[in-house]
Amino acid sequence: MQREVQALVDEWARTFNTGRPADLARFYTQDARIVPPGRSTVFGVETICAFFADIRAQGFRDYAVEVADVLAKDAALVVSGRWTLRGPGGGGLQLYQGNWMNMLAQGGTGRLIAVHMWN
């Protein structure tokens, strides 16, 4: 199960890193939400893609994730791990890192992100 989830989040990271945040829509359920640190929850695929487009426009890139834990709970998976990202700060690119957690639901073509949060 952990390999399947790692493949999913690696593909999400590759998609984000290409600079085409609208392509991230395929990873989320239609009623998905993201919970960014220090901000209000963002609801819906289109709004989520716009949020990540703004992140890219600010110069953030080189996103990478590592899956540390997968918990099967009823029909959902709760997955967590560490993330890294480079972005503006201190007069150049700075490394940011933290923890993330997703709740994955079964979609028509496989697992989809229903809830995505990080610190």
Image (spheres, helix red, strand yellow):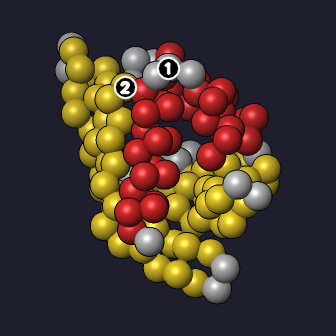
Contact between labelled residues 2 and 1, with CB atoms less than 8 Å apart: yes
Picture coordinates of residue 21, whole percent (x, y): 58, 27
Q: Residue at x 70, y 54 (%)?
A: 109
The amino acid beneath tag 1 is: Gly
Q: Which residue is mark 2?
A: 61
Q: Residue at x 55, y 55 (%)?
A: 116
Secondary structure beneath label 2: strand
Picture coordinates of residue 15, whole percent (x, y): 50, 32
Q: Residue at x 42, y 27 (%)?
A: 17
Q: Residue at x 68, y 38 (%)?
A: 25
Q: Which residue is mark 1?
A: 19
The amino acid beneath tag 2 is: Arg
Secondary structure beneath label 1: loop
Residue 38 appears in the figure: no
Picture coordinates of residue 118, whole percent (x, y): 44, 54
In the drawing, does residue 67 fall left or right of residue 46?
A: left
Cα gap from disc 1 to disc 2, whole angstroms = 8 Å
Picture coordinates of residue 72, whole percent (x, y): 52, 81
Mark 1 crowd level (few <14, some 14–19, many ≥20, 10 Å Cα): some
39 to 20, vertically: above or below: below
Q: Earlier in the sequence, mark 1 or mark 2?
A: 1
Mark 2 crowd level (few <14, some 14–19, many ≥20, 10 Å Cα): many
36 to 99, vertically: above or below: above
Q: Nearer the viewer, residue 34 or 104?
A: 104
